[in-house]
């Protein structure tokens, strides 16, 4: 599993190839309700309200924390779902009190 990586143009750097399936099965594994459930268990003052949604908007802006995936990849104009990395719960920890 890759825990961190950097883009480089160094010809001697190790080559890593990622497929869309591996990105979403290894890195961006959490759905919205998974993240909300984990936050409810981890933080004593957590509520799903406008404050939480404001924090989620900021998390969605960070490509290291959230990615959208098309439900039907054959239809580029179709619906997508946002998936979150495990780091998203750590980003929420900045705003809530741990149990």
Image: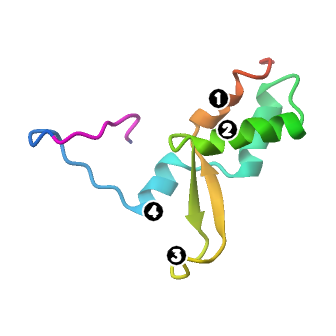
- On the question of residue 48 being in view, the answer is no
Question: Marks 3 and 2, how far apart in space?
Answer: 26 Å
Which of discs 2 and 1 lies nearer the camera? The answer is 2
Which one is earlier in the sequence, the residue at label 2 or at label 4? 4
State the residue position of label 4.
Answer: 21
Which one is earlier in the sequence, the residue at label 1 or at label 4? 4
State the residue position of label 2.
Answer: 58
CB within 8 Å, label 3 to label 2: no
State the residue position of label 1.
Answer: 91
Which residue is nearer to you in this view: 80 or 33? 80
Question: Marks 1 and 4, how far apart in space?
Answer: 24 Å
Which of discs 1 and 4 lies nearer the camera? The answer is 1
Total marks placed: 4
Question: Marks 2 and 4, how far apart in space?
Answer: 25 Å
| Residue for point 42% across, 57% down | 22
Q: Which residues are magenta?
A: 2-9
- Dot 2, how many residues are within 10 Å of its Cα: few (below 14), some (14-19), or many (20+)? few
């Amino acid at each position: 599993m890759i825990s961190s990586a950097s883009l480089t143009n160094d010809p001697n750097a190790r080559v890593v190839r990622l497929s869309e399936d591996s990105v979403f099965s290894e890195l961006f594994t959490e759905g919205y309700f998974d993240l909300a459930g984990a936050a409810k268990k981890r933080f004593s003052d957590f509520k799903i309200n406008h404050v939480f949604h404001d924090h989620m908007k900021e998390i969605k802006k960070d490509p290291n924390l959230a990615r959208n995936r098309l439900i039907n990849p054959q239809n580029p104009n179709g619906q997508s779902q946002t998936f979150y990395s495990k780091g998203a719960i750590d980003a929420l920890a900045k705003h809530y009190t741990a149990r």
